Image (cartoon, grey):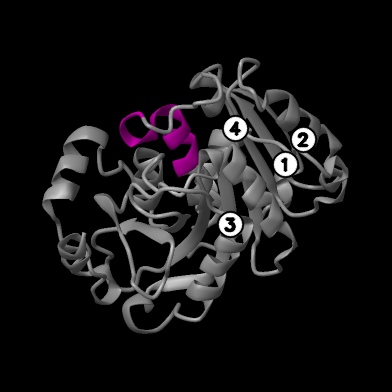
Amino acid sequence: MKGFLSALALATCYGKFSASPLLIEERQSTGTGTGSYAPAGYTQDPTLTGHTIFAPKKVPAGTKLPVLLWGEGGCSADSLQSAPFLIQLASHGVLVIASGTPKGSGSTTAALMTAGTDWIKSRAGTGNYANVDASRIIAAGWSCGGIEAYAQYWDSRVDSIGIWSSGLLTNYTMASLLKKPMFYFLGGSSDIAYANGERDYKAIPAGTPKWKGNLPVGHGGTYTQTNGGKFGIAGGYWVDWLLRGNASASSYFTGSRAKNDGWSVEFSNLDKIAVTPI
């Protein structure tokens, strides 16, 4: 493990994000993303305990990376549980801070996700993280990880929430208070979290930008398919729009493209989302 961490140590501006036998194997089995900043991979920073960083291996000079916080399904501390999906998002020019460590055991918490925000806010713009823009942060998660993401809503540093195959388990009234942009990616009626996500979406107050898509794949989604499958495609457009400010990516959600990919879609007030290109 020590050699693995050394081989993947972050270099300045990620300009030397080096390969290792593990990443070569990863490339063969799960892909390294299809975004404009591919290939992407993952590493750890010894100053960020209990987390894993997914990012493009090389970042063009002058490019800034916004931030996505991620919680795994089951609140698992194995940050590689949805690695193909997270690598795909990172390949779109995003720094993903996932709770947990590679093949880690045990559980994560909402507090651990918040610690990721604290950590990147104190380092963005300097040293190895000179190319990170921590003024743009989204919290998201799969299943139990989505509950951890919900808890970040009250953090003023977090701009939006992404709920993937999840929905509130308690404190259902929270949904009626949501004002930040909310995106729900559910696995259809066979998804164990389907009813929860549907209930939350409907309870969001009028005027809040919100989008909900259902892809009939169940609770497991397509996170582990090569490049995250169709969830990875949708997720790529999502971060392109909400984090990088690529307005053309919005058409995936507001036009026919998500529907053509098999998603059943509902949305409102998305015209209120305005993100300056990064």
The Cα atoms of the two marked residues, 3 and 2, are separated by 18 Å
Q: Between disc 3 and disc 4, whose residue precedes?
A: 3
Residue that carries the numbered disc 1 in the rendered image: 210
Q: Are marks 3 and 4 in contact (CB under 8 Å)?
A: no
Q: Nearer the viewer, mark 4 or mark 1?
A: 4
SS majority, magenta:
helix
The Cα atoms of the two marked residues, 3 and 1, are separated by 14 Å
Instruction: Say what secondary structure mark 3 lies in.
Output: strand
- How would you rate the neighbour count of disc 4 (Cα within 10 Å): few for under 14, some for 14-19, many for 20 or more? many
Q: Between disc 1 and disc 2, whose residue precedes?
A: 2
Instruction: Say what secondary structure mark 4 lies in.
Output: loop
The Cα atoms of the two marked residues, 1 and 2, are separated by 8 Å
Q: Please identify the residue farthest to the bottom as the structure is shown.
A: 126
Residue that carries the numbered disc 4 in the rendered image: 165
Q: Please identify the residue farthest to the left as the structure is shown.
A: 21
- How would you rate the neighbour count of disc 1 (Cα within 10 Å): few for under 14, some for 14-19, many for 20 or more? many
Q: Between disc 4 and disc 1, whose residue precedes?
A: 4
Q: Are marks 3 and 2 in contact (CB under 8 Å)?
A: no
Q: Are marks 1 and 2 in contact (CB under 8 Å)?
A: yes
Residue that carries the numbered disc 3 in the rendered image: 138
Q: Between disc 3 and disc 2, whose residue precedes?
A: 3
Q: Which residues are magenta?
A: 225-236
Q: Are marks 4 and 1 in contact (CB under 8 Å)?
A: no
Q: Is residue 108 above or below residue 143?
A: below
Residue that carries the numbered disc 2 in the rendered image: 201
Q: Amino acid at mark 1?
A: Lys
* Residue at x 38%, y 50% (from the top left corner): 104
- Whether the magenta-drawn stretch holds residue 235 is answered as yes
- How would you rate the neighbour count of disc 2 (Cα within 10 Å): few for under 14, some for 14-19, many for 20 or more? many
- Whether the magenta-drawn stretch holds residue 258 is answered as no
In the rendering, at what x and y percent does residue 160 appear? 65, 55
Q: Amino acid at mark 2?
A: Tyr
